[in-house]
Every structure is written in structure tokens, then in C-alpha cells.
Image (cartoon, helix red, strand yellow):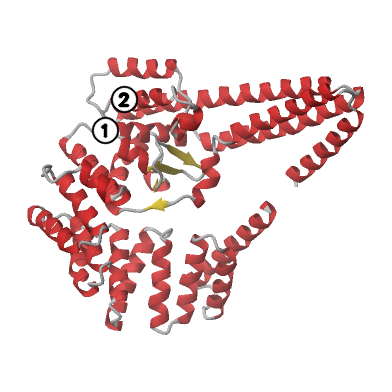
Amino acid sequence: MDNIEGRSLVNSMFSRAVAHSSGAGALRRFAMALMALTAAVTLVLTWPAQTARAQGMSLIRDAEIENTIRDWATPLLRAAGVAPESVTLRMVNDDSLNAFVTLGNKMYLHTGLLMRSENPGQVIGVIAHEIGHIAGGHAVRLKDELERARMLSLITSALGMAAAAGTGRGDVGSAVILGGSQAAMRNLFSYSRTQESSADQAAIKYLRATGQNADGLVEFFDILGDQEMLLSSQQDAYARTHPLTRERITSLEHAVEASDLPPAGDTAADRMRHARMVAKLVGFLKTPGVTFQRYPETDTSLPARYARAIAWYRQGKLDEALPVIDALLADYPDDPYFHELKGQMLLENGRVADSLSSYRRAVELAPREPLIRIALAHALIETGDDSHLEAAREHLAQAVKEEPQAGFAWRLLATVHGRRGDMTMASYAMAESALLHGDPAQAAFHAERAERGLKTGDPVWLRVQDVKQRADTMMTEMKNDG
């Protein structure tokens, strides 16, 4: 309502200013001033734009990579006094170099950043910096600052238009508006720089507390320093949304020089996990040609073999992919992620029954990985054999218990319950799935169907009430957003 009223007020004042303004030049200057203010606020509003866009971004999930990132983040979160389980870590399928946090303790890392990183310390440094934003409550505070800037822009526009209308001089109105735009920009740029410096210092603190130095963060900022030499349109998103200053880099360099601690992630195990992560992302996200060029046959390292196996599989050449993954399994028989990849290769090439043993072994080796359980349940369902439905249900129930935000798992649960004739639980699972996929109307529809078959007060009935309430809130928000 405030936005609508504000726009109505400004539009009214603008009409009056134009009607009374004398001189085309003054009017042009006035209009340019108004556009400058609008541009200033729009530019500032792009900083947290990821917060609004995150829901529509292409998020990708991978048990191995998420496990690696989670293991690196957990000690830093504890050092920051943030409960690790309260933070959601996700990858955005975007080739740009960026990372950000949003309301609700959600941290997003772009795949471009992960693939561009040269060592684990650089990724760990970025994670530490983003945790600094979480611990500092910067997302909430930035939202408040932006609201103040928005109100300032509306008030300044209204005052400028009133001045122009009252005096009949557009230059008077433009002076008011330009002064307001400059003040808004100064305040917000200053606030952003303060937040970034605060997150830097917090990152150094958390790294020290976990026995690591900030070498990787400095190296990453050196990459960003190169980005800042580019035009804004050519910069990666991190350079635009995390403004650097020479003072920030110098401060970090001094912290590293004064530290006798080893660099973050400076162990053979971490270096291998990083190399595997990069190889896996390249294999899945880059073209096979790029993958084979980056990891040629002459490279017999584990990460290179991993990347080539994925590239062959993506080309549909199972006769080339399977020997590579089988060779890796011969060398590393207890690696759950190699078993998972083999299961995926077989399942997606129509060899559903053959995929079960690989997925089952992966679950045995990594029982706390809900994404692998979901993959096994999917394969069990795809066999078409109803004797597998109870096992699929058990795996999915365990998966959503550990990760209730897994929308695909809820959809699979709906399939299982539907095939077993339990339409009440099928409707409930569909309601959860619809809610997670941003379809509140369908969520409410299925929740009401489920409610009719549930006993008042039982746990699922209570959860259905939560789903209905959340769906109603979402529909109201969508209606208000227009």
C-alpha cells in the first residue's frame, strides 16, 4: 500500500510541476534530475537483487560437493556462534563469479566461482566472508537501509516536484532531487563498504579460530581486483555486489603476514576434495569438448578420470563411460560417490534394474546423504515392481526427515502412496511438493484433500494446517506483489 500511495503522490506532483514549469531547458534538467534519482535507487537496489531472484535461480544439488562445502563451513559457523544446522548451503548454476547470503541464513555459491577457484583456501575464504555477513545480520540490516533509501527517494521526488510546481522553475526542483539522490547514494555505498569490511574482519577471526589463515581470501580478492578494472557490464557479479577497496585488501594482507597459521584447506585431503569438486562441475556443466580439453587422456589423475567419465556419460556413450567409472571403483571400492555416479549412468540409460546395486552400495557407504537415498528410491519406483514400493517409501521418509525442503522427494512419495492406494497421504505429499515448488494454489488444493482423510490432531493433520497457512500467506503475498 505504501508503494502504491507513494507512486500516486509522486505522479500527481509531477503532473503539477510539468503544468507550471516555465522553460524547456529547466524542464529537461528537472526530468534528468528525476531520472538520476531513480537510477541511483535502482542501482542500489541491484545489490541485494539476488535475495529476490534466488527463488527463480537454477539451483543444482550434488551430495558430494554439498558435503565438501558443508565440512568446510561447519567449523567456521561454530566459530561464529552460528548453529551449522540453521544455515542452508546451495549452489547456483551460474558461470559468473559470485556468492551471497539472503534472509533466513541461506548461502549461495555460484558454480562459476567454484570452478574458477584454484585451491580450497579460496573457497573457504569466501565461505568465511559470507558467514561474516550471516553472523552480522547484514541481510536484515541491508533490507532496512534499502527501505530507508526508497522512502528518501519518494520524499525527495515529491519535494522536488513541489518546489518546481510552486516556483514554476524546474531547476529548483532538479536541485532538490539531485541533492537527495547524492545523499541516498553516499549513505548506501558507505553502508555497503562498512558491511564488507566488517565481514572481512569476521572472516579473519573465524579462520584464526579454526587454525587457518586468510591466504585464500586474499588470493580471491586479487582475482576480484582484476575484475574491478573492467567495465561494470563485464565484471563478475561478486565484484559488483562486494565492492573492494585497496584498504580492504591491504588489511587482509597484513593479517596474513602477521599469522603463523597454515592456509585454509592446506591438506592433501582438502586439495583432493577441491580438485574432485572442480572436475565434477566441469564434467557436468561444461561441454564434453571443453572437459576433454581440460582433462586430456594423458592426465591419469583421479579428478581427470572422474571428469572424463562424466563427459562420456553426458554424450550418451555408456560403453566409454562405464569402463572409466569401473576402473575408479576398482581403485576406490568404498567411495560412495563413484557408486552413485554409476547408478545414475545406468538409470538414465534405461538400465534401471542394473542401477539398484550401485545405488544401494552408495547408501550403505553414505547413509546420511539424503540425496543418494532419493536417487535410490527413484530407481526403485522406476522398476515398476510394486514389491519395491515399501523400501522406496522408507528411503524417502528418511530423506525428507533429514531434508524436508527436498521437493522431488515429496513428489516421489506422492507417487509411492498413490500406487499403494493411500490417496490421503498422496495428497499430503503433493501439497508439500507444490509448496516447495512455489505453487500455493495447488498446495492448498492438495492440503484440503488430505485433511478430509486425516484424524484431527494427529501429526500429519497438524502439518497440513501449517501447509494451508503458508499457502494462504504465499497467495496473499503474490496478490499484493501484483
- Residue matched to label 2: 219
- Specify the label residue 354 is tagged with: none
Q: How far apart are marks 2 and 1 (CA)?
A: 9 Å
The answer to whether any part of residue 241 appears in the image is no
Q: What residue is at 56 percent from the left and 80 percent from the top?
A: 452
Q: In the rendered structure, are the residues bearing label 2 and label 1 in contact, judged by CB atoms less than 8 Å apart?
A: yes
Mark 2 residue type: Glu
Crowding at dot 1, Cα within 10 Å, few <14 / some 14-19 / many 20+, comes out as some
Q: Which of 356 and 89 is in front in this view?
A: 356
Residue 118 is marked as: 1
Q: Is residue 103 above or below residue 176?
A: below
Which element carries disc 1, helix, strand or loop? loop
- Give the residue type that dot 1 points to: Glu
Name the residue rendered at 57%, 36% in the picture: 46
Q: Position of residue 466 (x, y in %)?
A: 55, 63
Instruction: Name the spot of residue 337 as percent of width and height, x first.
Output: 21, 55
- The image shows residue 236 at horizontal and vertical percentages of 43, 33
Nearest to N terminus: mark 2 or mark 1: 1
